[in-house]
Image (cartoon, rainbow, N blue to C red):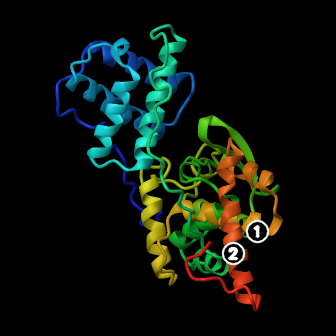
């Protein structure tokens, strides 16, 4: 299948290099033990671990610059100073919230294991980030995007990829790590392993099933050896090395396909998931059902799509009601 798979681009973002004094071993040891706990016991993804690692490296570097050699010397006042310094360094409210969340989890873990008497994060708050509504494509735009020509192997791969992500609302990481054994095309179901290694069953629509079958048949033609295409362990969307395609490769390909299909909005993998959630909620009104389909642990995460639905209704109201014309910019 030469030339049909976009070259994987591996994201190997390393932890931020320290520019100040080297943190003492006492700070490193607890941090490394916590990251090992997240990896082994909590089974967090490499992406999540990388984020925690960067946030805690930033804290360790800052403490070393302040001459703090032990976690027991960290208090709420110092943590506030750390967040203030990071804000002055240019971090936005969302990044500061994430950084403080990592620190809070790490210090709570130390309290649980008797390393600290109390969590210094108690009462420390990061600036509030403005809540941004996710962008979506409407149903016509989604149809325009997913119906790419499937005349060759690459087209069949692209069609199967787009149809599946929109049909089932998969995250980018879930799509990359999907294997044939997790797809039941006869039943129209996919078994997805999401965040925190939580498994959920999600329906696969008939258009996606058709596209996936065509893609599977293409793989069989390209690799006539049955052991190469019937093995349930193989990734649905492989990279050049035979392993799962990289997230970056999918991101780049979606951008190319959107331009090719005449869609000039910023199209990225999560936009397909947002559009899936918005369209299902708009048609069904079942917030709890959408939560289950998306694999959200907290329904508050899903509730953002109710705001999208209200925006649509507000536009319909403004356009249809003769005395409903509200002033521009007013909620």
Viewer-closest of 318 and 20: 318
Q: Residue 325: percent from the left, percent from the top?
A: 68, 87
Q: Residue 139: percent from the left, percent from the top?
A: 68, 77
> From the viewer's perspective, is 260 left or right of 139?
left
Task: Work out whether residue 282 can be spotted.
Answer: yes
- Tag count: 2
For the C terminus, give its image quadrant. Answer: bottom right
Q: Residue 149: percent from the left, percent from the top?
A: 57, 80
> From the viewer's perspective, is 7 left or right of 310?
left
Task: Work out whether residue 215 can be spotted.
Answer: no
Check disc 2: other Cα within 10 Å, few if <14, some if 14-19, many if 20+. few
Q: Nearer the viewer, mark 1 or mark 2?
A: 2
> From the viewer's perspective, is 246 left or right of 290?
left
Residue 299's tag is none
Viewer-closest of 23 and 13: 23
Labels 1 & 2 near each other (Cβ < 8 A) = yes
Residue at left 32%, top 19%? 28
Check disc 1: other Cα within 10 Å, few if <14, some if 14-19, many if 20+. some
Residue at left 23%, top 35%? 17
- Secondary structure beneath dot 1 equals helix
Lower sequence index among marks 1 and 2: 1
- Secondary structure beneath dot 2 equals helix
Q: Which residue is mark 2?
A: 312
Q: Residue 35: percent from the left, percent from the top?
A: 44, 24
Q: Which residue is mark 1?
A: 282
Viewer-closest of 154 and 148: 148
Q: Is residue 138 above or below residue 92?
A: below
Rendered image quadrant of residue 281: bottom right
Q: Distance from label 1 to label 2 (Cα)? A: 9 Å
């Amino acid at each position: 299948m030469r030339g049909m798979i976009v070259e994987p681009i591996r994201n190997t973002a390393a932890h931020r290099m320290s520019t100040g004094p080297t943190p003492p071993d006492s700070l490193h040891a607890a941090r490394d033990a916590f990251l090992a706990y997240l990896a082994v016991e909590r089974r967090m993804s490499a992406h999540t671990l990388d984020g925690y690692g960067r946030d805690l490296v930033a804290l360790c570097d800052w403490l070393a610059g302040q001459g703090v050699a032990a976690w027991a010397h960290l208090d709420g006042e110092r943590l506030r100073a750390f967040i203030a310094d990071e804000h002055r360094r240019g971090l936005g409210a969302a990044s500061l919230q994430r950084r403080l969340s990592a620190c809070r989890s790490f210090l709570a873990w130390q309290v649980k294991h008797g390393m600290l008497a109390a969590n210094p994060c108690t009462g420390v708050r990061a600036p509030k980030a403005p809540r941004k509504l996710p962008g979506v494509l409407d149903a016509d735009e989604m149809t325009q995007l997913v119906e790419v020509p499937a005349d060759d192997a690459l087209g069949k791969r692209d069609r199967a990829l787009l149809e599946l992500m929109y049909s089932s609302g998969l995250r980018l990481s879930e799509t990359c790590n999907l294997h044939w054994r997790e797809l039941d095309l006869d039943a129209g179901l996919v078994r997805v392993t999401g965040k925190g290694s939580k498994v959920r069953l999600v329906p696969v629509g008939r258009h996606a099933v058709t596209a996936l079958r065509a893609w599977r048949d293409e793989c069989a033609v390209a690799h006539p050896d049955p052991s190469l295409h019937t093995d349930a362990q193989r990734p649905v969307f492989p990279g050049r090395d035979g392993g799962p395609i990289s997230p970056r490769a999918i991101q780049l390909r979606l951008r190319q396909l959107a331009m090719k299909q005449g869609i000039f909005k910023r199209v990225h993998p999560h936009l397909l998931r947002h559009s899936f959630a918005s369209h299902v909620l708009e048609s069904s009104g079942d917030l709890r059902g959408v939560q289950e389909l998306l694999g959200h642990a907290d329904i508050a995460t899903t509730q953002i799509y109710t705001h999208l639905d209200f925006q649509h209704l507000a536009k319909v109201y403004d356009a249809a009601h003769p005395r409903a014309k509200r002033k521009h910019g007013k909620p």
